[in-house]
């Protein structure tokens, strides 16, 4: 579904040259959930933006569904770290923004928007303005917006990064449920090992300066996973330990 | 739903007392100012030729109401015409400055240099070019209002939050959609800052224009009353000018609340 082939990225500013990514190769199958973890500055957000077509790679290529990515695609949903809801639009109008931009059928998709909002527990909030919602609620609206065009691929850039711990767990359960029900192919960038293991079929570990893929860890725990289940917590203890080993090893060792 | 209602309903009682205070306090402020004025007049024993008392000015406003209204209307028309022209010209130029690096580099020195010229110095030139009609006053208002509106617009368009730019780009929006759906609405709070700065400059511009040569308008009335040593009439005209600029300013504040309600709670 997604193939990243030899991608490198070099940022050139006035004063210096930063090698953000070096020779990244990654394949994501249809319906697979991949978590990208790494320390700050390892280029995981840049990699996600290259997959989304928001940033061009310096070298290499990305293919989504067999097509080269040169610009953003409408069948790829992107969810940002911040909710990025337009403050002058109410919840429903924010969810329908992608439809409007694509000049789609606003009426037909309005009912889909209602369904999505109900799916994340926000029914009755269609007319509310973003400032009236809590951070967690705003991020749920943002998730609905990313899903409104029913994209095959969902890219998420630390979507729970700005939320409190309990809301994060709650939202991760909802994301798991929604992605399983709708069979999305997902790439999630996160700082949280727990989140990466909870949601991912495959956890990709990246190292900084330059950003490279160090290793991949498969998570075999059965779905749906629950934060409370013994099975999942065993898996978390095992895989989490392995991931910590990878993340905290000195970065000059390859 | 209940949560949204709670959030919406909670500040109402506080809002109401705030609203009342925001109505009463300005009147209190004006009352104090008039009191001080009166005190100075009484204590100093200055003649009404130097400093008329508030009562004299108030009486004069009533007796000369026809004259004040006619001339005030002229100044108001000049002010509004120039102000709207400044919006119509200034906002597109501000947008162009923000969008085009080349245009910005090319025009910015000219704009800053031009803004530094004292507009009073241009007023006689405008009279030479356009005569004593209403046009040189409108142009003077435009010259004064243009700069803050243009600059505020450019700043607002440039200040679109990064996350909104990425969002609209990820949706594959064209430049026109990006502008109207994201960048212009996001710039509105900034544009209103410019408009509020410009509206008081607009009235100043109209009066400068009238000082340079006119046959009507409040500025003209002040010049005439100076010539005939009618200080009370000059004060009455100044009062109307002040009242006009207060009303225009608060009309803008009201329009801002209507158009940019999301900024209120910041």
Image: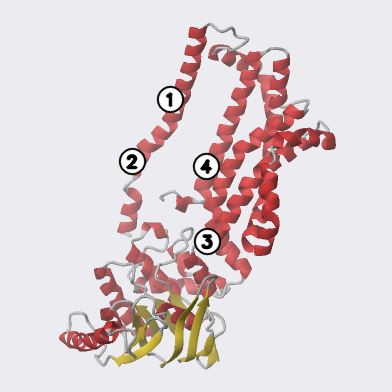
Say if labels 2 and 4 share a chain. yes
Q: Which mark is residue B253?
A: 4
Q: How far is mark 2 from mark 3, CA to CA?
A: 33 Å
Residue at 60%, 36% (x, y): give it. Answer: B200
Give residue A209's position: percent from left, percent from top. Answer: 40, 81
Q: Which residue is mark 1?
A: B28
Q: Which chain hosts label 4? A: B
Q: Which residue is mark 2?
A: B14
Residue at 27%, 80% (x, y): give it. Answer: A193
Which tag, 1 or 3, sits closer to the chain's start?
A: 1
Give residue B265's position: percent from left, percent from top. Answer: 41, 50
- How packed is label 3: few (under 14 Cα within 10 Å), some, or many (20 or more)? some
Nearer to me, B6 or A195:
A195
Q: Which residue is mark 3?
A: B160
Q: Closer to us: mark 1 or mark 2?
A: 1
Q: Closer to us: mark 4 or mark 3?
A: 3
- How packed is label 4: few (under 14 Cα within 10 Å), some, or many (20 or more)? some
Q: How far is mark 4 from mark 3, CA to CA?
A: 22 Å
Q: How far is mark 1 from mark 2, CA to CA?
A: 21 Å
Helix, strand or loop at mark 2: helix
Q: Is residue A150 visible?
A: no
Residue at 57%, 55% (x, y): give it. Answer: B155
Which tag, 2 or 3, sits closer to the chain's start?
A: 2
């Amino acid at each position: 579904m997604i193939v990243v082939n030899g991608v490198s990225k070099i940022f050139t500013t006035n004063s210096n040259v930063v090698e953000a990514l070096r020779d990244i190769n990654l394949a994501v199958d249809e319906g697979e959930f991949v978590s990208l973890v790494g320390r700050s500055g390892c280029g995981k957000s840049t990699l996600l933006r290259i997959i989304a077509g928001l940033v061009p790679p310096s070298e290499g290529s990305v293919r989504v569904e067999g097509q080269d990515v040169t610009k953003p695609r409408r069948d790829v949903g992107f969810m940002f770290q911040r909710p990025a809801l337009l403050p002058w639009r109410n919840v429903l109008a924010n969810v329908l923004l992608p439809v409007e931009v694509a000049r789609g059928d606003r009426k037909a998709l309005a009912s889909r928007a209602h369904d999505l909002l109900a799916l994340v527990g926000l029914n009755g909030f269609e007319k509310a303005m973003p400032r009236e919602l809590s951070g967690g609620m705003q991020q749920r609206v943002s998730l609905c917006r990313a899903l409104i065009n029913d994209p095959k691929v969902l890219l998420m850039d630390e979507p729970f990064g700005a939320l409190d711990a309990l809301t994060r767990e709650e939202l991760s359960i909802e994301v798991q449920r929604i992605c399983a029900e709708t069979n999305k192919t997902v790439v999630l960038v996160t700082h949280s090992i727990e989140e990466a293991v909870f949601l991912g079929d495959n956890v990709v570990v990246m190292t900084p300066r330059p950003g490279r893929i160090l290793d991949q860890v498969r998570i075999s725990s059965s779905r749906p996973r629950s934060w409370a289940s013994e099975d999942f917590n065993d898996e978390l203890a095992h895989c989490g330990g392995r991931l910590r080993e990878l993340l905290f090893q000195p970065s000059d060792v390859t | 739903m209940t949560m949204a209602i709670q959030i919406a309903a909670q500040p109402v009682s506080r809002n109401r007392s705030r609203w009342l205070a925001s109505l009463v306090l300005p009147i209190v402020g004006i009352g104090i100012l008039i009191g001080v004025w009166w005190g100075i007049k009484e204590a100093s024993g200055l003649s009404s030729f130097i400093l008329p008392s508030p009562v004299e000015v108030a009486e004069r406003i009533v007796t000369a109401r026809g004259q004040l209204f006619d001339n005030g209307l002229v100044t108001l028309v000049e002010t509004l015409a120039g102000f709207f022209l400044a919006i119509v010209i200034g906002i597109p130029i501000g947008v162009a400055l923000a969008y085009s690096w080349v245009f910005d580099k090319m025009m910015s020195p000219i704009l800053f240099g031009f803004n530094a010229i004292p507009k009073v110095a241009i007023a006689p030139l405008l009279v030479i070019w356009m005569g004593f009609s209403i046009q040189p006053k409108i142009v003077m208002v435009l010259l004064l209002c243009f700069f803050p509106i243009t600059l505020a617009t450019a700043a607002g368009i440039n200040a679109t939050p990064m996350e909104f730019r990425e969002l609209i780009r990820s949706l594959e929006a064209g430049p026109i959609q990006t502008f109207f759906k994201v960048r212009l609405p996001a710039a509105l709070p900034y544009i209103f800052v410019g408009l509020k700065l410009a509206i008081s400059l607009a009235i100043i511009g109209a009066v400068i224009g009238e000082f340079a040569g006119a046959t009507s308008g409040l500025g003209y009335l002040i010049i005439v009353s100076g010539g005939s040593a009618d200080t009370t009439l000059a004060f009455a005209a100044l009062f109307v000018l002040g009242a006009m600029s207060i009303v225009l300013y608060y009309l803008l504040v009201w329009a801002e609340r209507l158009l940019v309600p999301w900024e209120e709670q910041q």
